[in-house]
Image (cartoon, rainbow, N blue to C red):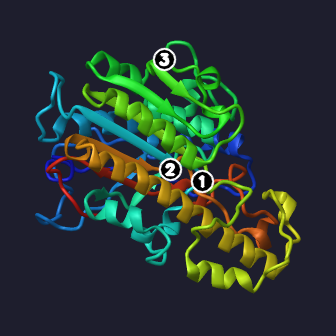
Amino acid sequence: MLGDQRELGIGELGRGDSGHGARGAHAQRGERAMALDRHAGTRKSGAPPNSVRSFRTAFSWFAPLVAFAAACAEAPPPPAVSGVPYVVLVTIDTLRADATTPYGAPAGDTPHLAAFARESVQFERAVTVMPTTGPAHLSMLSGLYPQQHGALQNGAPARSGTPSLAALMRESGRRTAAFVSVHHLSRGTLALDGFEVWDAPEEVRDGRDTVDAATRWIDAHRAVPFFLWVHLFDPHQPYKAHRDTPEAIRTELAAYDGLAVPGRGGFAVADVTPAQQAKLALLYRADVHYADRQLGRLLEFLEHRGIAERAAVVVTSDHGEVLDEALERYRYGFDHGEFLLPMEVRVPLWVRTPAGPRGV
């Protein structure tokens, strides 16, 4: 079982030089990025049995991780496939690890992620290969670094012949579908093989609409094994409050009623006031909570349809987000992609399999 039989030994992530753009810095980071330790059959030296496990991970081995989770879980598939019949990957865009309850955020911010984490293996040191949506997702879905699959910015496609987790799942006998919330993760943009259905908006859509589309597809295909990718974009700029934003966040936001804030981040927010910074941070929390609710709807649907107990479910993010931490030094904030700062490269990662291990 994952965590019981093996640990992944990963080299140290080099600290990103803040003076380089994301595309240039990523090339420099190639030698510093984490690499999968091939010696995966034993525990780290000196680690006692059942000790708290820590993992360092780069998304270059994400695809093998999902395939391994599907193969190792102990649940009899309905039709004949190897491993669990259902494999579900959920990516929540722009989600900082420390913005979630399991990684230290307030209990009311992400209650559904907290409940899911209690049933999963939580990875404490997971990092993205690049804090940019398209390249990071292509790495997750191919097992390659951006230099290898060829996409170094949003809108860039994968090179012809890029291996695909979806294609692997389809060859295994599973139906495959992707439901994404932003246009630059569409089939026409990423150009990755393997998904029979690839449902994407022309621009951006609400996570609720994405989950609704995914659940309709699940209902039509739950009698057969499948691999499903669901992407939520809600924590991305421009941040906003929602009708179901927790009362604690609403109360704090009330102090800033009428205060205008920028609708985009990056270097454009270099001169925001402390009050604007506080409001933007609260609105980001509100968006994270909203994405958590949509994840909760999806997980509840899988439970009610009897799929969850026979599914390997992976929840993660493509990258984090810089809030106000870099404003003083770099005059940059509430965005991602220009640097390799810890808060934008560290991501949350949970893996849940039937009868699988739990813990950190």
Q: How far apart are marks 1 and 3 (CA)?
A: 25 Å
Residue 125 horizontal side relative to residue 92, left or right: left
Can you identify the residue that label 3 sits on?
A: 193
Q: Are marks 1 and 3 in contact (CB under 8 Å)?
A: no
**Residue 236 location, x and y as percent?**
66, 54
Question: In the depicted view, which residue is nearer to us: 95 or 114?
Answer: 114
Q: Is residue 229 something that shows in the picture?
A: no
Vertical arrangement, residue 290 with respect to residue 78, above or below: below
- Name the residue nearer the viewer: 221 or 328: 221
Q: Report if the CB atoms under discs 2 and 1 are less than 8 Å apart.
A: yes
Give the image location of residue 152, x and y in percent. 66, 33
Q: How far apart are marks 3 and 2 (CA)?
A: 21 Å
Residue 334 in sight here: yes
Q: Which amino acid does label 3 sit on?
A: Asp
* Neighbours of disc 1 within 10 Å: few (<14), some (14-19), many (20+): many
Q: How many labels does the image show?
A: 3
Residue labelled with disc 1: 94
Q: In this view, does 57 lie above or below 343?
A: above
Give the label on residue 317, or none: 2
Q: Mark 2 to mark 1: distance in Å? A: 7 Å
Residue type for callout 1? Thr
Disc 3: CA contacts within 10 A as few (<14), some (14-19) or many (>=20): some
Under circle 3, the secondary element is: loop
Q: Earlier in the sequence, mark 1 or mark 3?
A: 1
Q: Position of residue 27 (x, y in %)?
A: 63, 38
Q: Which residue is drawn at 48% across and 78% down?
A: 106
At label 2, the amino acid type is: Ser
- Up-down relation of residue 198 to residue 236 (above or below): above
Residue at 49 percent of width and 42 percent of height: 212
First-in-chain label (3 vs 2) = 3
